[in-house]
Image (cartoon, rainbow, N blue to C red):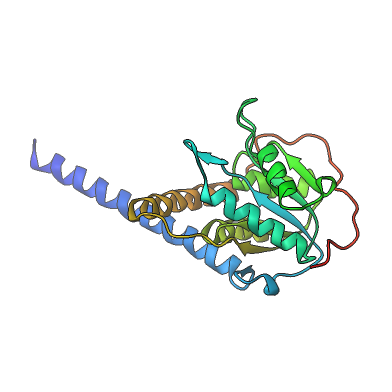
Amino acid sequence: MPRLSRRRILLTALLSALVMALLLAVSEGITHTMARGYCHEELRDCPGDRVGLVLGCSKLVGRWPNRYFTGRMDAAAALWHAGKLRCIIVSGDNRTRYYNEPRDMKEALVERGVPAEVIVEDFAGLCTYDSVVRARDVFGAENLLIVSQPDHVRRAVAIARCKGMEAEGYGAPLALGTLSSQVRACVRERGARLAMLYDLITHRNPTHMGQRIELPVTCAAAQP
C-alpha cells in the first residue's frame, strides 16, 4: 500500500475518532447540564402533584425476572403510595401480542397496590425520546416525574427539559450486576445519548403520534 494511502487512512481514522469523541462529550454535557438538580435518589426529595412517566423495559431476561423492570415498578409504586403522583403513564414497546411492556408494567403496578384506573398505557413508547415527547403531545402532561434507573432517568429528564417541559426524575435503585453487564450498560447508554443528540438537533417527531388522549382526573394520590 502506498505511504500516502496509509497516511490518508490513518488521518481519516483519527478525524473520525475526534468527531465521535466530540459528539460524546456534547451529549454527556447536555445530559448533565439539563438534568442537574432535577434527578432524585431519595423519595422525600421528589416533588408532588406530578404525572408519573415510567419508562419501559422487558419484564424478563430470558426466563429470569429483569432487575431493571422490578426496580422501576417498585419505585413507581412507592411514589404513588407516598402521594407524589396524580396518575401514571406506563410507556413502552408493544411490538407483538406476546411482547407488551405497558401491559406488563400496568399489571405489576396493580399487584403493588396502585389503582388500575390511574394507570394509562402508552403503547408507542418505542424509545425514550418518543415516550417523553408523546407524554406532552399526546397525553398533555407538562409536569412529569420520570421513573427509571439513574443514568437512564438523567437522559430522559434532559430530553424533557430541552423540550421545555417541567420534568424531574426519580432514579430507581439498582443492585450492581456483573462487570460485563455493567460495561454493556455503560456502552449502551453512551450510544443512547448520541441518539438523543441527533433527535434533539433534528427535532424528530415520534414514530407514532395519533389523537390526544386525556389523562384520568384524580385527587391526591394515596396517602402513605
Q: Nearer the viewer, residue 45 or 205?
A: 45
Q: In which quadrant of the rendered image does the C terminus lie?
A: bottom right
Q: Is residue 158 left or right of residue 214?
A: left
Q: Nearer the viewer, residue 153 or 57?
A: 57
Q: Position of residue 129 (x, y in %)?
A: 62, 47
Q: Nearer the viewer, residue 5 or 210?
A: 210
Q: Is residue 184 left or right of residue 50?
A: left
Residue 23 in the image: above or below residue 213: below
Q: Residue at x 72, y 43 (%)?
A: 106
One can see residue 203 in this view:
no
Q: Residue at x 34, y 56 (%)?
A: 179
Q: Is residue 28 left or right of residue 93?
A: left
Q: Position of residue 156 (x, y in %)?
A: 61, 55
Q: Is residue 123 left or right of residue 128?
A: right
Residue 91 in the image: above or below residue 75: above
Q: In which quadrant of the rendered image does the N terminus lie?
A: top left
Q: Residue at x 69, y 57 (%)?
A: 76
One can see residue 144 in this view:
yes
Q: Position of residue 74 (x, y in %)?
A: 64, 56
Q: Nearer the viewer, residue 185 or 20?
A: 185
Q: Residue furthest left?
A: 2
Q: Position of residue 171 (x, y in %)?
A: 59, 63
Q: Residue at x 43, y 55 (%)?
A: 23
